[in-house]
Image: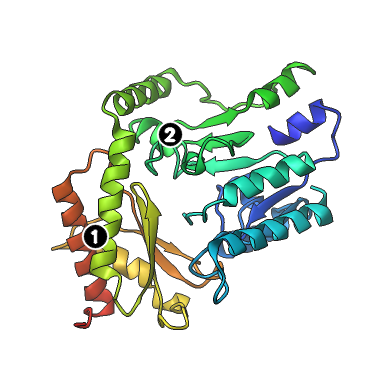
Amino acid sequence: MAVKYFAETGQPSRTHFIARRGGFHGTTAGALALTGKAAFRHPFEPLLKSDTVSLVSMPNTYRGMLPGETEPQYVARLAKELDDEFRRATGVLVPPAGYLRAVRRICDDHGALLILDEVMCGMGRTGTNYYHAWQAEGADAPPDIQTVAKGVSGGYAPVAMVLASQAVVDGINHASGIWNHGHTFTSHPVSCAAALAVQTVIKRENLVRYAAEMGSLLGAQLRGALGHHPHVGDIRGRGLLWAVEFVADRTTKRPFEPEDGIAARIHAVGMSDPWNIFLYPGTGTADGFKGDHILIAPAYIITTEEVGDIVRQTTGVVCQVLGSIPLL
């Protein structure tokens, strides 16, 4: 859609994308080309048009901030890197406050489109005032194009959406007015009905605000239970989307080696008796290859008691795999 927009508005040479190291955007060729996670890209590099994509740093306050650096200084440094990349190319981590506003400003300065992938974190998952994760910073940094999926139908039917600003829509409509590309099951009526039903319940039951309340409780309890474990480096999240990152050394933030398979082991133990909890494993957290984490993303209707259960089970699994928490 972005390429089509620029072609339709007399800027056909604008085909360069800037994405973030460590990001993941899908398994099709175009989405994989924008994926900055090295382990996912590695086998397919010959097929990817890397000359049309530049990668910049992910906003990672745990690993990216320099000693003594404040969040505003970190945001300014990330913004300068992005601005410099624009000039060269002409073309879960929770972001620190001001990051998205800085990105929006730089895109506007260079006439670029801001595209946000909210497939996992959108549609109320992060408990913002509205449905979108970017609205956590306020509604003054909207994207031009946005993708959403998982929370659209709550898993009851496969459905994803591309949202576009009025400016992007008008740019195409006022030119050819033609959109040539689609998919076999685009606008599938059953999927659309499921999505509408789910969104109706979310709005009626005020589940986005509830997700924020339960998310604050979940985050506080996770930090209280695991925050001083010698192999837990960071606990981060927003709303009902949380991650626990594991390290071999807390002081240096040195990750475990990939062959240790920490995230996979934690997941496997979690799925077994007596824990019976799904802890989504992730790797490449530190540099694209090394690093382990788990994701915790319960349903929007989780109860206070269930939050406690999740924290107790997660703590038990982590301690079984990585050892007990020493007494303070």
Residue 157 lies, in percent from the top left, at: 37, 30
Residue 252 lies, in percent from the top left, at: 47, 83
Who's the residue at 42% across and 21% down the image? Answer: 192
Instruction: For the C terminus, give its image quadrant.
Output: bottom left
Identify the mark at residue 221; answer none if there is no mark: 1
Badge 1 density bin: few <14, some 14–19, many ≥20, Cα 10 Å: some
Q: Quadrant of residue 317?
A: bottom left
Instruction: For the N terminus, give its image quadrant.
Output: top right
User: Does residue 25 show up?
Assistant: yes
- Judging from the image, what secondary structure is the residue with disc 2 in? loop
Residue type, mark 2 in image: Tyr
Residue 109 to residue 167: above or below: below
Identify the mark at residue 154; answer none if there is no mark: none
Distance (Cα) linking label 1 and label 2 = 25 Å
Residue 113 lies, in percent from the top left, at: 70, 38
Reading the image, the residue beneath label 2 is 131
Residue 10 lies, in percent from the top left, at: 86, 29
Q: Nearer the viewer, residue 11 or 45?
A: 11
| Pointer 1 or 2: first along the chain | 2
Q: Nearer the viewer, residue 153 or 265?
A: 153
